[in-house]
Amino acid sequence: MACTFPLKEIHTAQAIFLEKKHVGKIVLNVAQEQSSINSK
């Protein structure tokens, strides 16, 4: 795995992906965002 980002940082993750310098997968952590939505 190259790196992990919370869903709210999807723009940063996409920028790293488009540079094509990473080795491995870029993971977006959706679970953190879901728990914030469910607690409202």
Image (cartoon, rainbow, N blue to C red):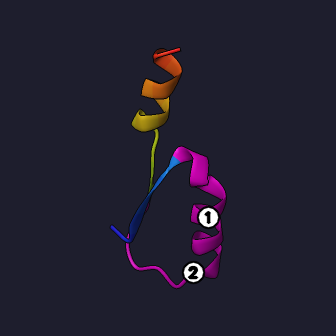
Residues 22 and 8: in front is 8
Residue at coordinates 58% horizontally, 73% vertically from top-left? 16
Quarter holding the N terminus is: bottom left
**Residue 27: quadrant of the picture:** bottom left
Q: Main secondary structure of the magenta part?
A: helix
Q: Comparing marks 1 and 2, which lies closer to the viewer?
A: 1
Q: Is 27 left, or right, of 37 in this rendering?
A: left
Q: Amino acid at mark 1?
A: Thr
Cα–Cα span, label 1 and label 2:
13 Å
- Image coordinates for residue 15, horizontal then vertical, percent: 65, 70
Give the label on residue 20, or none. 2
Q: Look at the image and say whether residue 15 sits in the magenta stretch.
A: yes
Q: Amino acid at mark 2?
A: Lys
**Few, some or many residues within 10 Å of mark 1 (<14, 14–19, 20+):** few
- Secondary structure type for disc 1: helix
Residue at coordinates 47% horizontally, 79% vertically from top-left? 22
Q: Which residues are magenta?
A: 7-26
Q: Which residue is mark 1?
A: 12
- Image coordinates for residue 18, horizontal then vertical, percent: 65, 74
Q: Is 16 left, or right, of 33 in this rendering?
A: right
Give the label on residue 29, or none. none
Q: Look at the image and say whether residue 20 sits in the magenta stretch.
A: yes
Q: Earlier in the sequence, mark 1 or mark 2?
A: 1
Residue at coordinates 61% horizontally, 54% vertically from top-left? 10
- Above or below for 5 versus 1: above
- Image coordinates for residue 5, horizontal then vertical, percent: 47, 56
Q: Is 16 left, or right, of 2 in this rendering?
A: right
Seen from this angle, which residue lies furthest bottom? 21
Q: How many marks?
A: 2
Residue at coordinates 49% horizontally, 34% vertically from top-left? 33
